[in-house]
Amino acid sequence: MLILFGIALVLNVSTSSAATVTNGTAVHTGPKVVSVNPANNSIILKSQTVKVTFNSTIKTLSPGIELKNGKTVVPTTYTINDSTLSVIPTTTLVTGVKYILTIHTNSISDLTGNGNSLYSTSFTVSPITLAQMKDGQKRAQTFFNNNQRLPNYVSYGSTKIPIAQFQKIIATQGIKINTKITASAKSKQSLAAIMESAARFGYSHDAHTAAAMEAIGAGDCWAMSDYLYIKMTAAGIKTRIIEYATAYSANHRSVQYSENGEWINVPYKKYGVNMMFWNTQSTGAIIRCS
């Protein structure tokens, strides 16, 4: 009985070399990572060797060291110097890409044969820092908000980064430019297109409606107001026609649109619309309102 118990005890000790049991819980005793360069989630300016340092001298057990760009495995070699594993890319790492280094379980061990636990770290190769990414995103977002399109590039001094590349770079840090056009911006785009189309018409006493003005290519202020009202209302812009006296007419008409609860005169002059159609005041009798 004592001999059998002794054999069982020896077997139990020999099969638990990689872990000890404390209060019924297995505690891993293999080599542990104490530092990595580049640091986890860091941004580096150019391709470099990745160095992972453990808390003890190490050696390899089985192949299981992977450097990836998404699902693409990057070819590497590696060396070991005491407690440091150096992972060396055999091709230059691409700028604007996030890389993940994975050291799979039992890929390396300490000198007594205890294997490592799964370890993963990541870094991004980028020509700009995180602070610069955030600054560039803010500038690009402001440009988009004002113009409803992205800029061609984002500049840093004399360096210009094409917008497609810039978006790819900032995406590695979970940063993006919101390119959704708001309802207000869409209304402004529609208004601009309508005013540009209105600028082609001349002034004439021979047309008093939109249809008549479009037929002959010219009309009076009533015709232009009718034209703008129809086009703007169809575009979903809240619109009204007002009428008032001017030095040239007792019943001049112009158009306004609603924005943030206020009535604003349409920008006739800005789009080169014939001056005979311009508004001369902002109040008057309301003729039509959508």
Image (cartoon, helix red, strand yellow):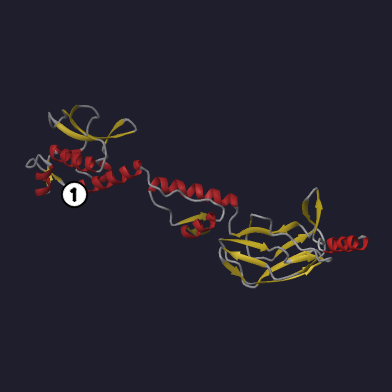
**Foreground of the two, 25 or 117:** 25
Give the position of the N terminus as an image quadrant: bottom right
Q: Secondary structure at mark 1?
A: loop
Q: Residue furthest right?
A: 2
| Residue at screen point 84% across, 61% down | 12
Judge whether 265 appears above or below 79 on screen: above
Image quadrant where residue 108 sits: bottom right
Q: Quadrant of residue 221?
A: top left
Query: Which one is in front, 182 or 206?
Result: 182
Q: Is residue 276 rendered to the left or right of residue 156?
A: left
User: Could you say where residue 94 lies in the image, as x and y percent from the top left?
Assistant: 57, 66
The residue positioned farthest toward the left in the image shown: 206
In the rendering, at what x and y percent does residue 227 appear?
17, 42
What is the three-letter code of the residue carrying label 1? Arg
Q: Position of residue 271 (x, y in %)?
A: 26, 45
The percent position of residue 253, horizontal first and vertical second, equals 17, 33
259 up-or-down from 119: above or below? above
Decide: few, some or many residues near mark 1? Use Cα within 10 Å; few <14, some 14-19, many ≥20: few
Residue at the image point whose x is 34% and y is 42% from the top? 183
Front one among 258 and 252: 258
- Lateral position of residue 273 relative to residue 106, left or right: left
Picture layout, residue 113 above or below residue 268: below
Decide if residue 222 is on the left or right side of residue 172.
Answer: left
> Residue 172 occupies which quadrant of the picture?
bottom right
Reading the image, the residue beneath label 1 is 200
Which quadrant would the C terminus be assigned to in this image?
A: top left
Near-viewer residue (238 or 35): 35
Q: Residue at x 24, y 48 (%)?
A: 196
